[in-house]
Amino acid sequence: MTKQINIFSLFVFLFLNLNAQTSLETEKIINAKDYGIYPNTFENIAPLLNKMVVEIAHFPLVKLVFEKGRYDIWPESSPKREYFISNTSTERECPSKIKTIALLFENFKDIVIEGNGALFMIHGKMINFAFDHCENIKIQNISFDYERPTMSELTFDEVTDRMIIAIINPSSTYAVIDNKLKFYGEGWTMKHDHTILIDPELFAFYYSKFSPLRKSKATELAPFKIKFEGDYSRFKFKKGQVLTVRDPIRDQVGAFIAYSKNVVLQNVQMHYMHGMGIINQFNENVTLDKVIVKPRKETGRKIAAFADCFHFSGCKGQIIIENCETGGGHDDPVNVHGTHLKITKRVSEDKINVRFMHGQTYGLDAFFRGDTLDFVHAKSLQIYGTAQVKEVKKINDRDLQLTLTNTIPKGFKEGDVVENVTWTPSVIIRNNYFSGTNTRGVLLTTRKKAVIENNTFFRTGMHAILIANDASSWYESGSVRDVTIRGNRFVDCAYNQVPNNYIINIWPENHKMIPDYYVHKNITIENNIFETFDTPILRAKSTSGLIFRNNKIVHTDTFTNEKGGKPSFNFVQCKNVEIDLHKSDKGKFDKIQTKNMETGDIKVEEK
């Protein structure tokens, strides 16, 4: 008996020891310096970087370690891939979808990229990093910036109706040719312009125009100091304002994460992103923790994002955005949505052709076998049937053919749309600071549970939170079923949208109302502080189960000339609405307005 126990013990010891050795063998620490990649050389590390990534791809468990310092990357020797990316560019704007990627990981599993405070400096135009078909991947303690951002910035030093003297940011390379100012960069010139004007004292952002300066007579008074002569009487420019201008074409993105699972970005600083921001496309489980989108302080720049900061298109699982900060974007800090595709043809009882409708979104792998889709009437956004996908056939970059496991539901009309509801995420957005944008703070359309809590929305130019859903403009789906907005601080938001400057806007684009049908359901807004210069607080349409309670309203005098006098609460065809107002807030809000509603559809109390 003792001999048998000893043999068994020996077997267990050998088994555990073998597993321990196997674990140690698979935990591979890769130091970039072992591949000749050293910081602060100011040389192009792209060839060595590409070679290293290819060589480590076969390891099952990797920690890739960079030393602290600066690493420079040029596009000529960086990898190139064809990527169709949501919300970027049309066929005419950008016919080629070939992208250049500084740091590319394809089909990696179980890898941590440790930056140790490394700064990757991008030259030309590139995607800073991309994760393509990866699983269990984490990038941390790393920063990205552009040597010459594709955003040009200048500050007004002197302003009259006939003359402007501007100081150009040193990163904005330029030339004065034939008395005209031309911005250029590493391998590009600015051909068209999209312009945002910044009031640096208020950190308020406004749509503007570069044409007054582009058409002016320009004279270089000193390096980075330009005198413009023209007629500026209509534009109300002021000393100290900053004009930020870019070419509108979104030919690259800041980061591209696609068809991946369990992705974590932690302590990642994006000091400049060209084209779009961090794009997540058909991913499952993504966490952004301490991701900062702001220029490096020493650059003196104001803009870090060419467009959106964090964008999620067709994702599922759990999205977590926490402890992040955005401060300087030409578009929304956060956008989470799906995509409606238009039904163009009923091929048979179980087969339909569908099309990507918005110009900047197409060519994606938008459906997979086994996915569930909803049929939606485009005008009313009414869901009237479901089906499962049996087969997906790509007709061209715009059109797909879907074979279903069941027949097309009754009520079908060509021109209706479908939404892939398998790829809809649960969302947590908490403990973030969103500022420095002329547009919205958070756009959210997902049917899974969503929580927006303990964030600060500081002077977003438009609605701090927009819950939309449409099948006629951007085709960004879909309906929400469970949203909680709590513990947030909203400071002077929506100054660009007077008079409809509602801080929270629940506004689906349903152009036809169906009696007793509601696009959105179950939205709770509680324990928030609204610090606002005007009366509008909340607007909602086609929503059932809307609660507004335990919120505080504080008046400010920030934008004294931007008041539209709209009702504080505006509801159109909503049901089961509960509004609880503090008596102490009386006088800080205006009336409650309703349309297409019965008396019993809304309950108002003062506590």
Image: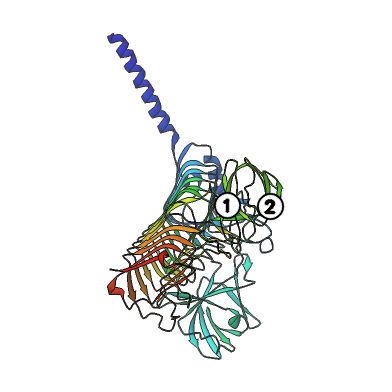
Q: On the image, numbered disc 1 is attached to which residue?
A: 384
Q: Classify residue 316 as left or right of residue 88.
A: left
Task: Please tell me which residue is depicted at 31% across the width and 76% down the height of the picture.
Answer: 586
Marker disc for residue 399: 2
Q: Quadrant of residue 299?
A: bottom left
The colour scheme used to paint the residues is rainbow
Name the amino acid type tagged 1. Tyr
Mark 1: which secondary structure? strand
Q: Classify residue 287 as left or right of residue 196.
A: left
Mark 2: which secondary structure? strand
Front label number (2 vs 1):
1
Name the amino acid type tagged 2. Asp
Residue 391: x and y, percent?
A: 65, 41
Name the residue nearer the viewer: 352 or 208. Answer: 352
CB contact under 8 Å: marks 2 and 1: no
Residue 101: x and y, percent?
A: 57, 53
Name the residue nearer the viewer: 2 or 64. Answer: 2
Q: Classify residue 324 as left or right of residue 345.
A: left
